[in-house]
Image (cartoon, rainbow, N blue to C red):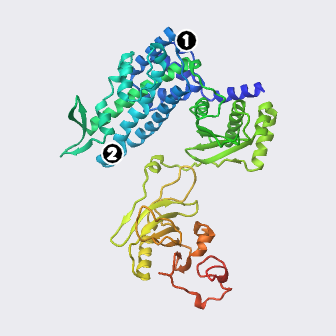
Amino acid sequence: MKTSVSYSEAKYYSEYDSATILMHLQEEFSIPINGICHEMLMPLYKLCFNTPYSYWNRDVAKQVIQRLENLYLQNSMNIRIDEVAFDFFLMGYNAYMQISETLSDMRDFNIAQELKTRMYRLPAYTSIVEGVLSNLLRVIAAIISPITGIDYTSQNRLANLLEMANKNGFSEIGSKVNVNIRNSINHGKVSIIKEQNCEKVRFYYTENKKSRSMEMLISKFDDEIDSMYDMVSGVLLALSIFLNNHIEILQVNRQEKTYISFALFALELSLPTVQCSSINDTGNDKQLNIELQVVNTNRDYLFQLSVMITIIAYNRYRNYQSYMINLSSTRMQGGWIRYTNEEAASMYESASNICTCVKQAISRNDAIIFPPSTEHIDLNEIKYFVFPNLITDKFKIRHVSDCSTPERKRLKAHLFVGDTKSREELLNIIDEAIEWLKGVKNPPAPTMLRKHGDMPADTLYINVYKEDARKNKNMFPANSNFICFVDYNTSGNTTLVHGGMPQTIWNSYLHEHVGLKRIAWRNSTYFTRHASNIGRNDLCPCGSGKKFKKCCGK
């Protein structure tokens, strides 16, 4: 049994040679680093080799790690990271990863500067200071409190945490923080100043009981955000190195089924090529869910990966009825492989049972792996693509979305027509909307092949409403704001059963076929009944393919 676990762990962790991280850190820092533990491999990898993580402030990182190591040498018996302190580390780390993605995505996003400042710059600064720095400082507070004899762990205010850091040898952290900017943002005292050749941000704050303000160019504020980000990167790197060097101080019960223990296990399972984004369960020991983001999308490899992860997970948590390995990738639709407790135990006991267990999972449809997309596409185009809206004096089209298939370009949209008076007027508006929507470009999909581009749409699904209200967008017959559902197809036929909604709701509408449009009316206001010349056994004019008596003739 141990052999099975040992082999799985050795095979799994052999995917990445942590020696490259070790060499990089040893070149940067004078302290001894003997190896990279599984728990800290992913944070250290990102901070060493990925941008913008790797722009960390050298002065901050070196001071923090040197100070922590000195404290450990002097007081190793008193230094512990309990679950509360580690939770602060996790909160800081997760906030850091989120804001890093935002910085990467939004820095070069070309929108109006005022909008970009309010949507990106101000929240980014707050997230760096409050979400990342404050939580990492709480970890430092937990480390030094038993050594100094002063309980810093109850400190919540940033100013107090910075004061704690300055008093205890972490002065580089405080020197990089502009508390006035943070206070201005948190209190909503920020304005955007537009001048002839530039735009500025003005911050209002109170200092020594006097109202003050400070202006800086947008470009200078960008530099301030970068400076703060690089500073917290340095703090995170130092804490990660410290935990890596002294993982024994981490006092977390790894056998418990809590957020903390699951999060620690996820860190253990994370590699540059296989990142475990989360681990959770469904309660009552029913199922353990392990979310993996993978680089290698080879089908055989993914099955091998699922086996290794299941054996490692079973070794720690043995009482779950099933183990679900969820797989996602940039170029592959999400899939999964699920093993029962009996199969996990069987693979854990002997490698000779693995093939049988995999075949059993496949035979009962507990293994779904989609082939990756190989289409040459621009991922940035997809990431930043936004469907247009159309606003005229007669109607509005909003909420355009894509539901295309490899064979058909299909778009969905909401059409708002106001207080349209007549059926003819409404049908003309619908036709205008169709002509515009047909020409809307749709982007490719990163994970699957679909028809895309500038060619006319084959199919359009349009929800028609009176007013563009925040609510009242449902399609229930009782919603007076809803007028009808339009199913347009160049062939005149549809493959959308019951309009994509429950049959009971679909049957409550009044159905009509108008040219290439199938229209499902909420009520009879605009409906023209064609039943007079239709026999009960004739095909229904709505295009359902059913007899009239079984469809609209009810």
Q: Position of residue 516 (x, y in %)?
A: 53, 76
Mark 2 or mark 1: which is in front? 1
Q: Quadrant of residue 172?
A: top left
Relative to 414, residue 384 above or below: above
Q: Residues within 10 Å of mark 2 (few under 14, many from 20)?
A: some
Query: Which residue is at 39% across, 43% downward?
Result: 106
Q: Which amino acid type is marked by label 2? A: Arg
Nearer to the camera, 490 or 468: 468
Q: Quadrant of residue 246?
A: top right
Q: Judging from the image, what secondary structure is the residue with disc 1 in?
A: helix
Question: Is 345 left, or right, of 22 in this rendering?
Answer: right
Q: Position of residue 305 (x, y in %)?
A: 68, 36
Q: Judging from the image, what secondary structure is the residue with disc 2 in?
A: helix
Q: Position of residue 487 (x, y in %)?
A: 53, 71
Q: Which residue is mark 1?
A: 77
Q: Residues within 10 Å of mark 1 (few under 14, many from 20)?
A: few
Q: Which residue is mark 2?
A: 118
Q: CA distance from mark 2 to mark 1?
A: 47 Å
Query: Which residue is at 73% across, 36% downward?
Result: 319
| Residue 45 visible to the viewer | no
Q: Which amino acid type is marked by label 1? A: Met
Relative to 399, residue 59 above or below: above
Q: Position of residue 267 (x, y in %)?
A: 58, 30
Question: Is 543 left, or right, of 201 in this rendering?
Answer: right
Total labels: the figure holds 2
Q: Are marks 2 and 1 in contact (CB under 8 Å)?
A: no
Relative to 309, residue 328 above or below: below
Question: Which quarter of the image is occupied by the N terminus?
Answer: top right
Outermost residue on the bottom side: it is 533
Query: Which residue is at 59% across, 66% downward?
Result: 500
Outermost residue on the top side: it is 74
